[in-house]
Image (spheres, rainbow, N blue to C red):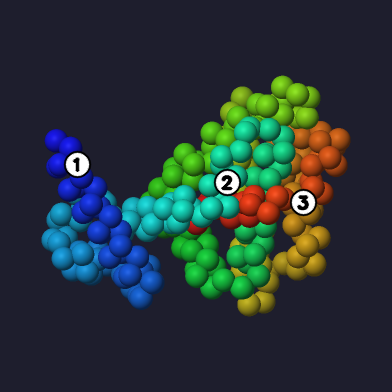
Amino acid sequence: MSTLRMTSDLRRQLILSAAKRCFARNGFAGTTTKSVAAAAAISEGLLFKHFPSKAALYAEILTEECEADPDFAHLLGQEPSTATLVELVKGMVGHFVEVSDGSDPEEAQRLRLMTTSHLDDGEFARLLYDKIGGLIGPVFSASIERAVAVGDAVRIGSDPLNLFWFAHHTVLMAALTRLPAVPCLSYGNAADLQRQLCQFILRGIGLTEAAIASHLDCELSPTSGQSVTAESA
């Protein structure tokens, strides 16, 4: 049984490696499951036993990239606390503002793909939300509970994970308005935008003004994360 599992796991990794090459060369739209199967030297039917669709392949690759990011791993390894909660929000806001400023065309394309998925069958968005929620959700929710317990936040609703998604939706939409060559909205200075978004979100998820004042201006430690995403999340 263990030998079969190892063989299956190895094949899965070979498929992912082949898919990464295909996506890097041809982009999402130009890649097919048939081309990935050919690059992995397997049948398309065997590929589907591991990944039911192209979107599932791409979502898995993005999740692996998140997990391999040392900044991201460091942040998720922090003890649940108000400080961790603020770092998560600052990292997410910083990531989306950076993506929308045009400095990383690949990340911008992923943001477009995520948006298009919402207007299409939603498969890619659902897969990525599920994976990112599984990675970030536990530490975010635990940090919310901790902040409430120590008096740094008031409880907003009965499901802390919803607060993460509300925060994500806010920065996603803000990023989309800045994605075109001529932005749909002008928010002004990027640094001011980041701070204002952070303040808006932290208040929205229940943090007190005292907690925000105490933690928002603290510099992130040199190894702390700035790569919290829900599309590359």
- Give the number of the disc on residue 74: 2
The residue tagged 1 is 5
Q: Residues within 10 Å of mark 2 (few under 14, many from 20)?
A: few
Q: In this view, does 123 lie to the left or right of 199?
A: left
Disc 3 from disc 2: Cα separation: 15 Å
Above or below, 172 against 205 in this view is below
- At 82% from the left and 49% from the top, the residue drawn is 217
Disc 2 from disc 1: Cα separation: 30 Å
Disc 3 from disc 1: Cα separation: 45 Å
Residue 44, quarter of picture: bottom left
Q: Are marks 3 and 2 in contact (CB under 8 Å)?
A: no
Query: x, y percentage for residue 139?
Result: 57, 35
**Secondary structure under the numbered disc 2 in the rendered image:** helix
Above or below, 74 against 40 in this view is above
**Secondary structure under the numbered disc 1 in the rendered image:** helix
Query: x, y percentage for residue 150?
Result: 75, 24
Q: How crowded is mark 3: few (under 14 residues within 10 Å), some or many (20 or more)?
A: few
Number of labels in the image equals 3
The amino acid type of the residue labelled 1 equals Arg
The residue tagged 3 is 219
Query: x, y percentage for residue 48?
Result: 21, 53
Above or below, 44 against 90 in this view is below
Q: Which of marks 3 and 1 is nearer the N terminus?
A: 1
Q: Is residue 195 left or right of residue 1?
A: right
- At 45% from the left and 56% from the top, the residue drawn is 65
The amino acid type of the residue labelled 2 equals His
Query: x, y percentage for residue 212?
Result: 81, 40
Specify whether residue 59 is in view.
Answer: no
Q: Seen from this angle, which residue lies furthest front? A: 222
Q: Which of marks 3 and 2 is nearer the N terminus?
A: 2
- At 44% from the left and 43% from the top, the residue drawn is 130
